[in-house]
Image (cartoon, rainbow, N blue to C red):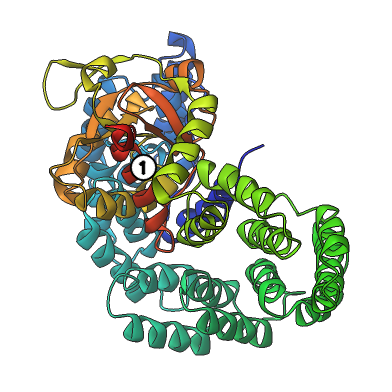
């Protein structure tokens, strides 16, 4: 079973699709040419209907999107119909939907001919983002908002461009946006992410309660999603308040499970107050969490606390050691060290125990040898023995991948001079032309390697991107199925640090 951070990638994917203007890669069925007869028929339709977007798209697909003759045909048609914006718009839209670099040329031409076409500026914004031209992407989406001020989607994407600026300024912009679009799903989306990204617990609760008040979850999907986060937050702070919210949300999907969790936690808290720790543990062991939840660590820490109070500190230590070994956090680390001390273990022994658990589950990473984008050479994983490797599978148009890169970079920057290597394998060769410009424009420091979806699936079991791995100095995969965002840089720091320190305690 994949862990909860991995499941949350779906939510992040929805965010990026909506904010960056991306669509999931819509590769045409046929990249190569059709039969000569089919091409001739498609061309005849274009000549008969030179203003038909559908006719141009049919012709492009018939020719094959990688056909070098397409560019020449485009120029010929533009010379014949210099005022016909449908021609560059059709070409640009087809390549944009396929997330191919040819889109830029045609979309820029369409924008120059029809500067008040908001959709063109929106597509240009998304295309600029793939190239790593974030400032240009912001400028283009600003132009889309000016061309169509009533469109909440464009306005939301422009709002999102301020996310990494001053937090108070961004918060104010979110609430201004909410006032501007009080009945639009985008308003609920803006408030949802304000709450989801909040690291202060009180702020998180306040934003999500405001979301519930302004955008009833029965009417707005993003508000409904926000209630999952709010309920899970309440479960950790006030399970009775959580139960009240859950009762309003009904029993569909995972709400029935959450109701059972809330009722159990209320009962467990009462048993704990009565110092009936044994029955509290029995009750907690019966708790079944929804597949996607925000309380996994909370439940683990709760159980360990009850075990310790029941004078079974060893059980508390063992349960947290297994969890910390898989995905470390500061909360788990603090509790693990406490229970370790109570069982007579110092920090060195605790880390040896953790290493033993990890080693028992470690598997050797496939020793790939893949081409570099920065030269004609190749990189072999075996050449990195003795170093810790952060490996990610990605592609330039992958929204969740690109959302995660700044967080990876922030952590990697803290390990400069250490034996840590940051590697990214692009699984989509069609998007190769984006790779080096994106790297140069964003200043990300990972080593980009040439790969494919087939390679990623066969040798690393990757079925979606991003997929992340941490490989130790012996070439073994120690961590996988983790995601990093603004709330959990520390987790990656702990993982890397533990692999750098691995084995040093015995020296």
The residue depicted at 27 percent of the width and 29 percent of the height is: 432
Viewer-side residue, 243 vs 303:
303
Horizontal side, residue 317 vs residue 347: left or right:
right
Instruction: Please provide percent x and percent y for residue 137.
Output: 27, 59
The residue depicted at 32 percent of the width and 38 percent of the height is: 505
The C terminus, quarter of image: top left
Looking at the image, can residue 363 be seen? yes
The residue depicted at 86 percent of the width and 53 percent of the height is: 286
- Residue 166 position by quadrant: bottom left
Instruction: Please provide percent x and percent y for residue 131.
Output: 24, 45
Viewer-side residue, 144 vs 36:
144
Q: Secondary structure at mark 1?
A: helix
Viewer-side residue, 302 vs 105:
302
Horizontal side, residue 213 vs residue 450: left or right:
right
Q: Mark 1 highlights which residue?
A: 498
- Residue 466 position by quadrant: top left
The N terminus, quarter of image: top right
Question: In the image, is residue 39 above or below residue 478?
Answer: above
Query: Furthest residue to the front?
Result: 344
- Residue 304 position by quadrant: bottom right
């Amino acid at each position: 079973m994949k862990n909860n951070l991995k499941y949350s990638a779906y939510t992040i994917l929805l965010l990026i699709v909506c904010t960056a203007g991306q669509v999931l890669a819509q590769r045409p069925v046929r990249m190569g040419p059709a039969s000569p007869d089919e091409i001739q028929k498609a061309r005849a339709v274009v000549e008969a209907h030179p203003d038909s977007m559908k006719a141009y798209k049919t012709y492009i697909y018939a020719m094959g999107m990688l056909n070098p003759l397409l560019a020449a045909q485009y120029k010929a048609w533009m010379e014949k119909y210099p005022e016909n914006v449908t021609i560059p718009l059709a070409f640009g839209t087809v390549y944009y939907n396929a997330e191919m670099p040819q889109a830029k040329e045609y979309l820029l031409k369409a924008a120059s001919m029809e500067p008040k076409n908001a959709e063109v500026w929106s597509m240009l914004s998304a295309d600029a983002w793939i190239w790593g031209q974030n400032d240009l992407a912001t400028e283009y989406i600003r132009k889309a908002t000016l061309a169509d001020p009533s469109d909440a989607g464009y306005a939301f994407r422009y709002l999102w461009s301020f996310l990494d600026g001053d937090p108070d300024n961004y918060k104010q912009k979110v609430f201004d946006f909410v006032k501007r679009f009080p009945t639009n799903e985008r308003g609920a989306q803006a408030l949802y992410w304000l709450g989801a990204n909040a690291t202060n617990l009180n702020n998180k609760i306040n934003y999500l309660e405001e979301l519930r008040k302004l955008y009833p979850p029965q009417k707005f999907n993003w508000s409904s999603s926000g209630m999952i986060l709010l309920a899970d937050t309440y479960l950790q702070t006030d399970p009775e308040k959580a139960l009240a919210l859950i009762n309003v949300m009904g029993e569909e999907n995972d709400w029935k499970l959450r109701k059972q969790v809330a009722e159990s936690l209320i009962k467990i808290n009462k048993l704990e107050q009565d110092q009936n720790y044994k029955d509290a543990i029995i009750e907690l062991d019966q708790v079944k969490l929804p597949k996607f939840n925000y309380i996994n660590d909370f439940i683990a820490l709760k159980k360990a606390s009850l075990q310790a109070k029941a004078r079974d500190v060893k059980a508390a230590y063992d349960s947290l050691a297994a969890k910390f070994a898989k995905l470390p956090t500061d909360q788990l680390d603090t509790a693990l060290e406490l229970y370790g001390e109570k069982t007579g273990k110092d920090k060195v022994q605790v880390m040896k125990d953790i290493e033993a658990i990890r080693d028992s589950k470690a598997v050797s990473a496939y020793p790939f040898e893949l081409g570099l984008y920065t030269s004609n050479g190749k990189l072999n994983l075996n050449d990195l023995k003795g170093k810790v490797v952060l490996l990610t599978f990605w592609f330039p148009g992958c929204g969740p991948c690109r959302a995660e890169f700044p967080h990876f970079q922030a952590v990697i920057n803290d390990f400069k001079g250490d034996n840590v290597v940051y590697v990214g394998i692009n699984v989509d060769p069609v998007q190769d032309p984006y790779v080096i410009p994106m790297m140069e424009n964003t200043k990300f420091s990972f080593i980009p390697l040439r790969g494919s979806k087939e390679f990623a699936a066969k040798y690393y079991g990757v079925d979606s991107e991003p997929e992340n791995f941490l490989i130790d100095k012996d070439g073994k995969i120690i961590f996988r199925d983790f995601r990093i965002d603004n709330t959990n840089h520390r987790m990656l720091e702990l993982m890397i640090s533990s692999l750098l320190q691995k084995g040093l305690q015995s020296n």
